[in-house]
Each structure stands twice: as structure tokens, then as C-alpha cells.
Amino acid sequence: MKRPAGPAILSLRLLLGILAFTALLIRPAAADIYRWEDEGGVVHFTDDPSSIPAKFKGKSREILRTPPAAGQPSVSPMGGSSSAPGPSNSPSPSERETIGPPLFPEDDDATRAEKLRAKIDAKERFIRAVDERQSLATNPYRNRLVTSSDLELYRKYKEELPRDHESLKELDSRLIPVKEP
């Protein structure tokens, strides 16, 4: 068997050297996420605290820390508990985390209405997509299947939508109309 010539070996060694050097330069990924809000009320998220403007650094919050070890559940400061009331098997907070009042103030009616509109829109788009997959007109060969979990969600959304529309009407009725000059 013939060995590779000098230039081929040199280029291979150079390539391996460059790969080894770049592997040394790569830093491990950081999992810390920071949240801050500007004067316009826009919420920003970043994993680089140096990218937060100086005047907002005092108002920024660390919302996600380095993930727990494999197989260990995490305690998230975002959202509430979805479990039933009663004794909880959830882990106690770590040294840096505290349990107390919610991190964010409760939404006003306008924000709740916008969130509900987005939820209704998402549910209606999902229902239309399932209807389209089930329709003989748009799927004559019946090659686009609907899974049982999609059908279950479809039925749930069909039941929830009328209540969501009523809730939206109620929220909209409580909002003060803005008069244009």
C-alpha cells in the first residue's frame, strides 16, 4: 500500500491542528436567562447580562438558572403550579432561589383580552387545520392523517371556544374605549 505524499500529510495535520485549536476556544453554553423591561413596557430576554442597558440593569431579573443535574426536576419561577392542591413532592428551592409573591404583576383587562384573542386565534387555526386534513375536498386521497391526540385536542378546543368568546366579550365590555382627537 502506498503512503500519502508529503503535501497531503501536511494539509491533514494542519486541518487537525486547526480543529483542535478551535475546540479549545469554544466555551460551554450558559443557561442563565435574564428579563428586563424598557421604558416603553417592552419585555426583553437575554442570556448575556452585558447586553442589558445600564439604566435597566437594576430592574433586570435572572429568570432561568443553569439547569439541574440530569433526572432532577427544576423549580421554575415562571408560571404557577399545575398540580392538584394538597401535599406536594416538588423540590425545595436552591440557595439562590426564593419562593414568594409572583415575579410579575397581575395582568390588566387589556392584556388579558389580548392574550385571550391570541389563544382564540391559535385554537381556531388548529381547528381549521384538523378540518382541512379531514376534508375530502382538500385531502381526496386521505393521506394526511389526524392523530388521536389531535382529535382529542380538537374536541376540547371546540368545547372551549364559545366560553372563550364570551369571556372576550366580557373583557372588551369592561375596557374603556379610547377617544381619538
Image (cartoon, helix red, strand yellow):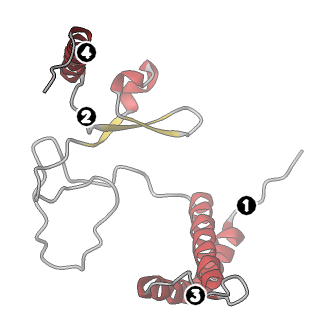
How far is mark 4 from mark 3, CA to CA?
A: 66 Å
Farthest residue in the front direction? 1
Q: Which quarter of the rendering shows the N terminus?
A: top left
Quarter holding residue 147: bottom left
Upstream in the sequence, badge 1 or badge 4? 4
Label 1 or label 4, whichever lies nearer to me, is 4
How far is mark 2 from mark 4, CA to CA?
A: 39 Å
Label 1 or label 3, whichever lies nearer to me, is 3
Upstream in the sequence, badge 3 or badge 2? 2
Q: Which quarter of the rendering shows the C terminus?
A: top right
- Please tell me which residue is depicted at 71% across the width and 71% down the height of the picture: 173
- Please tell me which residue is depicted at 25% across the width and 34% down the height of the picture: 30
User: Quick one: label 4, few (<14), some, or many (20+) residues within 10 Å?
Assistant: few
Residue under label 3: 158
Q: Secondary structure at mark 3?
A: helix
How far is mark 1 from mark 3, CA to CA?
A: 30 Å
Farthest residue in the right direction? 181
Nearest the eye: 25 or 73: 25
- Please tell me which residue is depicted at 51% across the width and 58% down the height of the picture: 107
Q: Is residue 55 left or right of residue 62?
A: right
Residue under label 2: 30
Q: What percent of the width, then of the height, locates residue 12?
A: 23, 18
**Where 156 falls versus 27 (above or below)?**
below
Residue under label 4: 8
